[in-house]
Amino acid sequence: MTAHAGAVARLAARRPLLVATDYDGVLARLRDVPGEAVPEEWAPGLLRRLASADGVVVALVSGRGVADLRATSGLAEPFRFVGSHGAEHDDGLDPAVAAERDLLVDALTPLVDAVEGARLEVKPAAVAVHVRTVADRAAATALLERAAAAAGPHHTAKPGKDVLELAVTDADKGTAVRRLAEQLGADGVLYLGDDVTDEDAFRALAGDGTTVKVGDGETAAQLRVADLDGVRELLEELAQALGV
Ligand SMILES: O=P(O)(O)OC[C@H]1O[C@H](O[C@H]2O[C@H](CO)[C@@H](O)[C@H](O)[C@H]2O)[C@H](O)[C@@H](O)[C@@H]1O
């Protein structure tokens, strides 16, 4: 039994129940190359068990675009997908944002090209500057500062783990999860996340959700687990409480 058994048991009694989880750093270990961040071995089966319970919907909520999230995770239906930090729901994204994103690509490409090991990730509604593989840490910090300075007032800067993302919408995971919960008429919501942008979801669910921070650091979440093994234990406990 985990330290969170009481909260898990209370959650398991609610229907409809939305189980929403971040991907990178929660279901998949962080890797140098984003495309190699596959789910932990236990994750697909455990998520399917949860989704098989009556009245339970499982959603993946990520900073990745939905197509990337599906491809990298290998997950598909019956799961729901929220991508681009909340700007994409399942497969839908306003095509008008692409042109705005491409202007950002043009502005950021020369900055990234000038720093060895840096990488630009082009996403449906955002551009991410990755510095995890920049050996010169001072250069990495300087690049993130230059990228932040390139943002216009209509862009949303989203810092993360060795990454700064500039989004062309003001969507966030909090608004997106609330929207999905309302669509489902959810009576209970569980949200797990490890990074800065998950704090939007923790805050948005503060009144009526159950929120779990994965790892160290200040957080608005109510509960905490240490690492991905803690995620597995908590979700396993929920599956057992749901009888699946
Ligand atoms: O919201 P998430 O599912 O946590 O996605 C956040 C970002 O995840 C990816 O970047 C992070 O994971 C990479 C792979 O482990 C790692 O190399 C990088 O340093 C991390 O920041 C993804 O590439 C981004 O698009 C997501 O926004």
Image (cartoon, grey):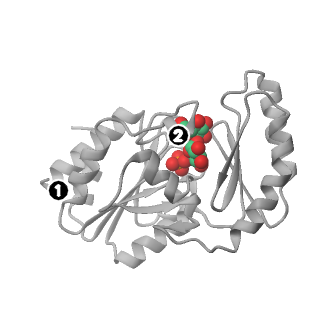
Ligand 1 within 8 angstroms of badge 1 C-beta: no
Pointer 1 residue: 242
Q: Residue furthest top?
A: 135
Q: Residue at x 32, y 61 (%)?
A: 77
Q: CA distance from mark 1 to mark 2?
A: 33 Å
209 with respect to 165 (left or right) = left
Mark found first going from the N terminus, 1 or 2: 2
Q: Residue at x 26, y 38 (%)?
A: 2
Q: Who is closer to the viewer here, 218 or 130? A: 130
52 with respect to 234 (left or right) = left
129 with respect to 191 (left or right) = right
Relative image position of residue 157 (x, y in whole percent): 73, 54
Q: Residue furthest left?
A: 243
Q: Quadrant of residue 167?
A: bottom right
Give the structural element (helix, strand or loop) at label 1: helix
Relative image position of residue 187 (x, y in whole percent): 31, 72
- Mark 1, Cα crowd under 10 Å, few <14 / some 14-19 / many 20+, is many
Relative image position of residue 238 (x, y in whole percent): 23, 50
Q: Who is closer to the viewer here, 184 or 38? A: 38
Pointer 2 residue: 35
Which label sits in the foreground, 1 or 2? 2
Can residue 54 be seen in the rendering of this structure?
Answer: yes
Q: Residue at x 77, y 62 (%)?
A: 155
Give the structural element (helix, strand or loop) at label 2: helix
Q: Amino acid at mark 1?
A: Leu
Q: Amino acid at mark 2?
A: Gly
Q: Quadrant of residue 175?
A: bottom right
Q: Residue at x 67, y 27 (%)?
A: 133
Can residue 196 be seen in the rendering of this structure?
Answer: no
Split into 4 quadrants, where in the image is the N terminus?
A: top left
